[in-house]
Image: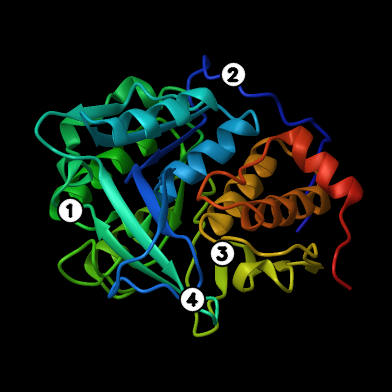
């Protein structure tokens, strides 16, 4: 397969253009244990709230890289919602499709960290504002310039959300957009039952994303294996991101396999690193950057993300990525 790339700089955040990327799902705040080994079963000190939610982290990172990006979500009429909304606005995300729900609280996530690097979450989503997102919240004009609709399996935590995502898929495909899908499980504490890869809602989303309607469709997927690796794949391409990016990434297509070494950084908080990596990768593809540069930027975004405490606190723009790459040492 022959691929032609032009070197175009990633832009600075704007927020005024119609979104090229639209994503949909949970916008929430996260409250984090202060020390490793802390347990929810005993009193402890917690830090936050921090803006969070996988689709929101993804949207924030893409917007900071200058890709006009819109998020469809619901929040409460509370200070948690204001905190999350203002963060996205500051970073250039199109927020007009974020609705404030009267009588519902903004979604929350509490997280603790174990010594082996694993995390334990308690979510309040389905019965909070994220569970009130409805198909009626979708404005078809938001998709006018959409090139990619990004869907995360973690967002498929309720029947209402699934119906809303179905409608978004229709609107995006009618606009000629690609579909990007990450089929990770909804959080066990966020949904009444886990949604596996064989679940009808995953099959439905993948059926849309793999559809051929006279043009190629991006089907970006992610899964966690027993080691915690994240795998992104779509027709003709594949990329593997080992846990926390410790061993870099492996990209493969019909013609080549490219291993990009990880950057040596001290991990502070891994939450959001995969979302930043994926958003940076997609941003580079949408701007036709050379593939080696796309992969290097994606690795750098993940490294910067794990080096900061808080889901979005390590998000990066083009300048910070360039500065990091210029001075950081990749692993051998």
Say what secondary structure mark 3 lies in. strand
Mark 2: give few (<14), some (14-19) or many (20+) Cα within 10 Å.
some
Cβ atoms at labels 2 and 1 below 8 Å apart:
no
Mark 2 or mark 1: which comes first in sequence? 2
Which residue sits furthest top? 16
* CA distance for labels 1 and 4: 24 Å
Position in image of residue 126 (x %, y %): 17, 53
Disc 4: which residue: 118
Image point (56%, 69%), residue name: 231
* Dot label at residue 2: none
Using the image as rendered, state which of residue 27 and residue 173 is in the foreground.
27
Mark 1: give few (<14), some (14-19) or many (20+) Cα within 10 Å.
many
Disc 2: which residue: 14
> Height in image: 162 above or below 223?
above
In the displayed structure image, the side of residue 65 where residue 229 appears, left or right: left
Mark 1 or mark 4: which comes first in sequence? 4
* Dot label at residue 126: 1
Foreground: disc 1 or disc 3: 1
């Amino acid at each position: 397969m022959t691929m032609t790339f032009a070197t175009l700089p990633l832009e600075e955040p704007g927020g005024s253009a119609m979104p090229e990327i639209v994503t949909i799902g949970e916008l929430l705040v996260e409250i984090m244990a202060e020390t490793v080994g802390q347990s929810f079963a005993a009193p402890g000190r917690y830090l936050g709230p921090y803006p969070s939610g996988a689709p929101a982290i993804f949207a924030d990172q893409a917007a900071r890289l200058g890709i006009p990006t819109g998020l469809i979500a619901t929040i409460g009429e509370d200070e948690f919602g204001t905190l999350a909304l203002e963060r996205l606005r500051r970073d250039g995300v199109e927020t007009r499709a974020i609705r404030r729900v009267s009588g519902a609280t903004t979604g929350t996530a509490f997280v603790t960290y174990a010594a082996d690097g694993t995390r334990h979450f308690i979510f309040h989503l389905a019965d909070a504002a994220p569970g009130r997102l409805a198909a009626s919240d979708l404005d078809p004009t938001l998709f006018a310039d959409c090139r990619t609709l990004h869907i995360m399996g973690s967002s498929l935590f309720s029947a209402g959300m699934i119906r809303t995502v179905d409608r978004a898929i229709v609107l995006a495909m009618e606009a000629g957009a690609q579909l990007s899908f990450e089929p990770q499980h909804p959080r066990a504490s966020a949904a009444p039952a886990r949604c596996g890869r064989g679940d009808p809602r995953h099959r439905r989303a993948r059926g849309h994303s793999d559809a051929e309607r006279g043009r190629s469709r991006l089907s970006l997927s992610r899964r966690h294996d027993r080691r915690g690796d994240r795998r992104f794949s779509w027709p003709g391409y594949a990329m593997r991101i080992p846990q926390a990016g410790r061993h870099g990434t492996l990209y493969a297509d019909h013609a080549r396999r490219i291993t990009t070494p990880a950057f040596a950084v001290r991990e502070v908080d891994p939450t959001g690193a995969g979302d930043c990596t994926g958003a940076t990768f997609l941003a580079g593809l949408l701007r036709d950057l050379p593939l080696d540069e796309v992969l290097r930027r994606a690795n750098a975004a993940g490294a910067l993300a794990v080096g900061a405490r808080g889901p979005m606190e390590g998000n990066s723009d083009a300048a910070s990525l360039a500065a990091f790459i210029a001075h950081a040492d990749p692993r051998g």
